């Protein structure tokens, strides 16, 4: 059995990217708290059904997806639903359904947002990325940007993020086919990168392909910190990971779990496998959404990755050092709300968590101290 470890590496090549999910937090944001509830911890919304993505929208509302196919916009002060829209094409199957979402950098003027979901394509369970436009409190003009991504009842990814050079980043799981993660001809088990119109960037590592990196099992969290792109990833029964993503790199799955050691060394050397900066060691936590906290409101969490976990039902703090590597790990709120799927942070430093318990029993919780 492998001990729990934190691994320190320096990224040779990093993906310069900015998070469109309010992931880059001002150190000292303006005081915009007038009229907000004052509880240290409060429930913002109940009655949800498997929420997957929560993001702090550019309109200062909480936007969320629920796996059965619903997109909602909430007033974060009251929890009131001000938009509810269902994508009828979504097919929920196990862990599949409506997954990641992100706003366009110019959302306040163009209303564009992006989602990724699973559906039935000629009888085959498939994943695709679709752009919508928000106007008159409706979502209209769906446009498919990327299709034919393998899907399954498990291991679908899938988070979205937009870079400062207007590239859409998509995480995909291996879709129950572990060997496909090593195949550059498959879109599963990858980090994908496309232009916002769905075309392939000329500077991608594999010409004509959306693949940015490969060898991923089930990455369900993504965040930018100081020009480094971090992703959380589920291990099988050991070695959940946090990685710094790098252009064209192999992250090992299924031949490597966690760091390169023992019999994995030969594969790692031959295939230039990147090493995680943190691993859960001899157990799994089922790591999901991550975000970066760097705000004075909750001083103990400054300069940390906050990570939601499903199996362990805990919010983890991965404290970073000056090089952006993990120097310590601690957990909070274990078991308080059940399985935790995602996290977002407001510019004022309020932390929001969504649960993943199902049966209409899910909620969004706010932590402000």
Image (cartoon, helix red, strand yellow):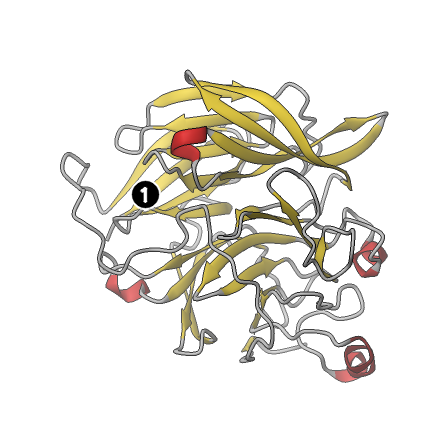
- Percent x, y of residue 120: 78, 27
Number of marks in the rendered image: 1
Residue 240 to residue 78: above or below: below
Q: Residue at x 41, y 72 (%)?
A: 320
**Residue 47 in view of the camera:** no
Residue lying at 65% horizontally and 32% vertically, measured from the top left: 97
Residue 338, above or below 326 = above
45 on left or right of 37: right
Relative image position of residue 215 (x, y in whole percent):
75, 62
Q: Position of residue 102 (x, y in %)?
A: 51, 40
In the displayed structure, 102 sits above or below 304; it is above
Give the residue pinned by disc 1: 366
- Split into 4 quadrants, where in the image is the N terminus? bottom right
* Label 1 SS: strand
| Residue at x 78%, y 51% (from the top left corner) | 208
Q: Is residue 137 visible?
A: yes
Number of residues whose C-alpha sits closer than 10 Å to that of mark 1, classed few (under 14), some (14–19) or many (20 or more): many
């Amino acid at each position: 059995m492998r001990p729990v470890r934190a691994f320190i590496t320096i990224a040779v090549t990093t993906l310069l990217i900015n998070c469109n999910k309010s992931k880059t937090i001002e150190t000292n944001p303006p005081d915009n708290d007038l009229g907000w509830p004052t509880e240290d911890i409060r429930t913002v919304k109940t009655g949800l059904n498997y929420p997957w993505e929560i993001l702090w929208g550019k309109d200062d509302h909480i936007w969320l997806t629920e796996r059965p196919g619903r997109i909602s916009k909430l007033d974060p002060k009251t929890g009131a639903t001000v938009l509810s829209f269902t994508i009828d094409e979504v097919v929920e199957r196990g862990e599949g359904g409506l997954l990641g979402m992100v706003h366009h950098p110019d959302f306040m003027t163009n209303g564009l947002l992006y989602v990724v979901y699973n559906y039935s394509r000629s009888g085959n369970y498939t994943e695709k990325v679709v752009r919508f436009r928000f106007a008159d409190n409706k979502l209209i003009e769906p446009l498919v940007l990327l299709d034919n991504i393998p899907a399954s009842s498990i291991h679908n990814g899938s988070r979205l993020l937009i870079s400062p050079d207007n590239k859409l980043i998509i995480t995909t799981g291996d879709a129950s086919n572990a060997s496909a993660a090593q195949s550059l001809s498959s879109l599963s088990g990858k980090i994908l990168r496309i232009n916002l119109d769905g075309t392939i960037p000329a500077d991608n590592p594999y010409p004509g392909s959306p693949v940015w990196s490969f060898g991923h099992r089930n990455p369900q969290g993504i965040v930018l910190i100081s020009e480094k792109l971090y992703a959380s990833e589920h291990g099988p029964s050991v070695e959940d990971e946090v990685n710094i993503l790098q252009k064209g790199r192999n992250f090992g799955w299924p031949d490597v779990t966690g760091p390169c050691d023992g019999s994995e060394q030969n594969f790692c050397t031959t295939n230039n496998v990147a090493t995680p900066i943190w691993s859960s060691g001899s157990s799994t936590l089922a790591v999901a959404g991550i975000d970066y906290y760097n705000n004075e409101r909750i001083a103990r969490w400054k300069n940390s990755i906050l990570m939601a976990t499903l199996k362990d039902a805990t919010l983890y703090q991965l404290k970073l050092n000056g090089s952006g590597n993990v120097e310590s790990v601690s957990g909070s709120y274990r078991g308080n709300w059940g399985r935790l799927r995602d996290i977002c942070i407001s510019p004022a430093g309020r932390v929001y968590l969504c649960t993943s318990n199902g049966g209409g029993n899910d909620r969004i919780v706010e932590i402000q101290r």
